[in-house]
Every structure is written in C-alpha cells, then in structure tokens.
Image (cartoon, rainbow, N blue to C red):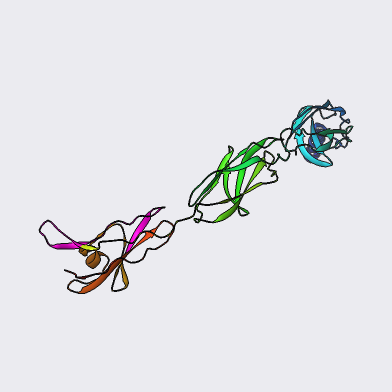
Amino acid sequence: MTFRTVSSVAGAAAVVGVLALAPPAQAADLTAPTTPQGLRVTGTTDSTVSLAWNASSDASGRVTYRVYVSGTWRSNAAETSHSQGGLSPDTSYTFVVRAVDRYGNVSRASNAVTASTAAGGGGVPGTPVNLRVTAVDYDSINVAWDAAAGPPVAYYLVYRNGLWVNSSYGTTGSADYLSAGTTHTIQVRARGTDNSLSEPATITATTQADAGPPTVPANLRIVTDSFGRPSGLTWDASTDDRGVSNYWLSADGSEAFGGGLGVSFYSLTDEYCTVFSGQTYTFTVRARDLSGNLSAAGTPLTVSVP
C-alpha cells in the first residue's frame, strides 16, 4: 500500500514537471506590416521605371515588398528600391507597393505614382528615302537607299513583289534568283528596335533581257585517241550573250548526254548506257544557255559506235 501510494505521487509530480516545462502557446501573427510611404519614381528608360519608397515595419522583424504595375503584381523586392523592367516604350504605367511579413500578411497599398517610359529607344522609324536601283543583271536587281529618319533602326527588310527576300544592316540590298527580262516591284522597310515596321519605299525594276538562244553548235565530229582509234564526239563551242550552260547530245532523237563540250564513247556506252557498241546512230547536238533557252540542232553526224 505504502509503495503504491508513493509511486502514484511521484508519477503525478513527474507529469506536473513536464507540464511546467512546456512553453506557452503563441498566438498566430495576423497583423500586417505598416504601409510603405513615399513611393516615388527615380528614373526611366524606354523599357524600365525605377522606384524607391520608405521602409515598412512589422513585429516579425522581416519585411519584403510586392510591386504592382497598373494593378498587376509584377515583381518582388527585398529592399526599398526596385527597377521594373519589361515595359513598352512611350507607355504610361501606374505603380503601387505593398509590404509583406514572414507570415504572409500584406499591408495596404502605398501611394500610387504614374510614370511613362521613354520614346527614344522605340517607336516606328520613318520610311527609307531615295530608294534607287544601282545595278541589274539577268537574274538580280541591286538597290540602295538613304537611312530612315526617326526612332532607331535595327535593320532593313527587302521585299520583291510583296514577299520578303533579304535583310540588310546597311543601306544596300538585292533581290536574286530572278528570270531574265522580268519586271519586279522592290520595297524596303525599316525594322525598329521595338520590332515595329516602317511604311515601305517602293520602286519598279526590270532584269536584263536575254538576247535569245545560243548559236548552233557547229562541226560535230569524231575524235580519236593517240593510236588513231575513234574515242568520242566533240563539236565547236556555241556563244551566247549570257553564257552557255551545257549541251544536249541526242542519238536518233533521244537524249544521250547532257554536259560539257564533247563526250567519249566509253561514257555513252558504259557510264550513261544510252547507246550500244556496234550500233549505228545519227547524232545531233544543241546548246542551252543560262536562261534555259535551247539552240537549234547542229548538222547531224551518223556514226557506228565502236
């Protein structure tokens, strides 16, 4: 009996001791920081607005800030100044700041300030001036222009018949891969640093016309090797105002070879397999120029292929 009584008292004392050691429960912090005061604009560029304000206070001892741009929470700040980026040039924005403590309590909004970004770094450039043709070829038109006035220009775009074909960081450009003797509308537009596009400068130009097909290849003949044996065919070169691209050799009316000046029988029989050894063919040759024009066929030559 005595033992059990002593144990019960000791146990009760132990429980009381544990309870006495437990810290008292703390009430949750529901109080917001003080409102930031004195919000002001300290600088602007074409894409940023810099702000500063007086510090808020809070019982928790730690405060950060939320920056709102025209009603939208855009950034967080740990200090009492902030540079808000990502803004458009020549645009007005309204800013407020709220303080936040470590428990997430948010203060009332500071005084509102309004600021406009600068226009110098953006805006639509002027139209390029004095657009002119500097050279034409059978397949290209070269142009030049004077720099666009107004806001800064990142680069220029060259269009042909309404389609973009080239870009230039200077004041010259070209439209290439054109057909001879064709007329085209060339336009140039300035691209601003804010990605805007100027109105186009426009000019019309015509590529150099091709005078016609090449001259007829003449003197189609057999050539021999060093032992006097027939080894292939050749002919005299054609001429053309733009230039000869290649020759088409036909055997009995079917194309047997397309290429340069002359061909060996070995190539015709073993590489291209367009004729057969021991057979007789009537060959003709035509010239093709860089515009795709074909000459008339030269004088036929009948040959027994060795």
Segment tinted magenta in the rendering: 222-248
- Residue 95 lies in the magenta-colored region: no
- Residue 225 lies in the magenta-colored region: yes
Residue 62: x and y in percent read: 79, 29
Residue 217: x and y in percent read: 31, 61
**Above or below: residue 84 compared with residue 138:** above
Residue 235: x and y in percent read: 26, 60
Residue positioned 64% across, 36% down in the render: 147
**Above or below: residue 242 compared with residue 252:** above
- Foreground residue, 246 or 210? 210
Q: Is residue 191 left or right of residue 59?
A: left
**Above or below: residue 112 compared with residue 223:** above
Q: Quick one: which residue is furthest to the left in this view? A: 227
Specify whether residue 140 is in view.
yes
- Foreground residue, 117 or 10? 117
- Foreground residue, 24 or 190? 190
Residue 279: x and y in percent read: 19, 74
Label total for image? 0
Residue positioned 83% across, 26% down in the render: 53
Residue positioned 80% across, 35% down in the render: 67
Residue positioned 25% across, 72% down in the render: 282
